[in-house]
Image (cartoon, rainbow, N blue to C red):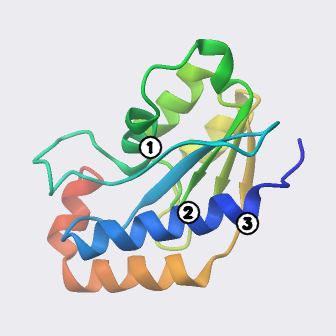
Amino acid sequence: MSGQWDLKGLQIAYEEAQKGYDEGGVPIGGCLINNKTGEVLGRGHNMRFQKNSATLHGEISTLENCGRLPGKVYKECTLYTSLSPCDMCTGAIIMYGIPRVVISENETFKSPGEEYLKTRGTEVVLERDQRCINLMQKFIKERPQDWFEDIGE
């Protein structure tokens, strides 16, 4: 599948991650873009601390902000995320049949979900966005206990 919207998606994922950090949350962001039209169907960021939520990771927040979509729409999209998707977010990607995921970075956290997505036929593209790496490293250094809580450790 073509990545003609990748720069746009990566920029939005970073913007959302920065927004999450600025709000006092975990700096992970994302967006869902239609592969055919380039339309941004939704964007979001980790809201676990802001909303006292156990599940509002960046990818889940992104999907939530898309609202209800027909199942076939997800199958025409790319999910952009600023960090390697955890097992919960990987499950949502598989459940909705999103065929392509672009990850800004996996140096600070690499989920086994990346490989699992590939075994399920999802195209996984890894970029190395230094902005996202720096932001996550800063957050982990400042708030290690909150980071470990976010990833279930």
- Residue 107 location, x and y as percent? 55, 73
When the figure is inspected, residue 138 is found, relative to residue 92, above or below; the finding is below
* Numbered disc 1: secondary structure: helix
Residue that appears at 34% across and 86% down: 138
Q: Which residue is mark 3?
A: 7
Q: Which residue is mark 2?
A: 12
Q: In the depicted view, which residue is nearer to us: 38 or 140?
A: 38
Which quadrant holds the N terminus?
A: top right
In the image, what residue type sits under mark 2? Ile
The dot on residue 124 is: none
* Numbered disc 2: secondary structure: helix
Left-right relation of 66 to 78: left
Q: Which residue is mark 1?
A: 62
- Residue 74 location, x and y as percent? 64, 25
Residue that appears at 54% across and 47% down: 112
Binning the other alpha carbons within 10 Å of mark 2 as few (below 14), some (14 to 19) or many (20 upward) gives: many
